[in-house]
Amino acid sequence: MIVQTYYLLILSTFISLTGIAQSKSICITIDDLPLISTDNTNQNQQYVIDRLIAHGKQFQAPIIGFVNESKLYKEPSKTNFRISMLEKWVSNGFELGNHGYSHLNYDKVDTTTYFNDILLGEKISKKLSKKHNLPFRFYRHPFLHAGDTPEKEVALENFLERNNYREAPVTVDNSDWIFARAYDKAIDSKDEEMRIKIAEAYVPYMISKTIFYEKNAQALFNRDIPQILLIHANRINADLLDNLMEQLLQEGYSFAPLDQALKDPAYQSNDHIAKPWGISWLQRWAKNKKMSSDFYEGEPACPKFIQEYTGLTE
Ligand SMILES: [Zn+2]
């Protein structure tokens, strides 16, 4: 018993000295703001933003939203309203980041086109962030594509650095976008039974994904790392992000801001793959660490009934 207590003391001293957190943390990042939905009415736009903000506040989670500013101008009559939704976001203390003006696929365009699109994508969000005393400092790659050649990877990194951006990696990648399409379809077609079925499958799926990537981090670093979850500004998250966050708390997670998550040395790992792949940064790092094929096995799939209902596949 004395020996056991002694070891516990040593262990807790070690933990406090090294600063290794006993609890797990996760950063919630939300892409494709102000809205990605089949319903582009102002009413739905407001519903999604209001609910996401409310969930973030309820859990005191420093969620960050990544914007495609082209969405502000698709319907000129809605421009001012959509800008006001972004302003509501920052005025509630939540950070915005740049997700490219028009959500370009870096593999399909040259660097000049891609970089101009990034600069075009900061006009409104940067101004609003400044007005509300928030930093505007992160860039999230559309489709998680960071360059399909070594030259393009380095060119983008250098461009971001020159323009005072930091990359916003993703570790917990998932198919919330397929769930969202299914959820939208069920709502649009007033199929309440289907909507509930999709909703019931969503949070367990997202938790299984988180646990899968948690095991990936353990395999790579022999410890937990701050995870970074990617979700989108859609109706399914407007309705269920609070349930998801509640479950994440049950799994032992706390909610961390992105800049804090990125302080973990794991994020210094080599993420160059020079492939047209939009994959988790954990898998990027694993490629460079030459992990064996079983590292990638067992990734939870989006349920078949959801893929069939939407006609979308992973
Ligand atoms: Zn996106």
Image (cartoon, grey):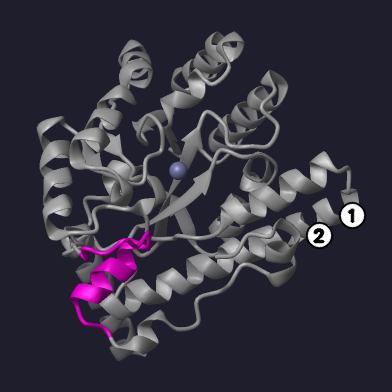
- The kind of residue on which mark 2 rests is Lys
The residue closer to the viewer here, 32 or 14, is: 32
Looking at the rendering, the stretch of residues picked out in magenta corresponds to 273-291
Q: Amino acid at mark 1?
A: Glu
Residue 64: quadrant of the picture = top left
Q: Quadrant of ligand 1?
A: top left
The response on whether ligand 1 sits within 8 Å of label 1 is no
Q: CA distance from mark 2 to mark 1?
A: 6 Å
In this rendering, is residue 151 above or below 121? Answer: below
- The reply to whether residue 93 is visible in this rendering is no
Would residue 71 appear left or right of 8 to someone viewing this image? right
User: Is 290 inside the magenta-drawn segment?
Assistant: yes
Q: Nearer the viewer, residue 220 or 264?
A: 220
Q: Is residue 64 left or right of residue 200?
A: left
Residue 35 in view, yes or no: yes
Reading the image, the residue beneath label 2 is 197
Q: Which quadrant does the C terminus fall into?
A: bottom right
Residue 14: in magenta span: no
> Where is residue 83 shown, x and y percent of the image?
50, 15
For the point 59% across and 64% down, the residue is 313
Residue 142: percent from the left, percent from the top?
Answer: 38, 45
Closer to the camera in the image, 243 or 291: 291
Toward the viewer: 108 or 71? Answer: 108
Is the C-beta separation of discs 2 and 1 under 8 Å? Answer: yes
Question: From the viewer's perspective, is 201 left or right of 87?
Answer: right
Q: Which mark is residue 219?
A: none
**Image vertical order of residue 224 relative to residue 108, above or below:** below
Point out residue 271 in the picture as x, y percentages from the top left corner.
Answer: 21, 62
Q: Residue at x 42, y 24 (%)?
A: 69
Q: Which mark is residue 193?
A: 1
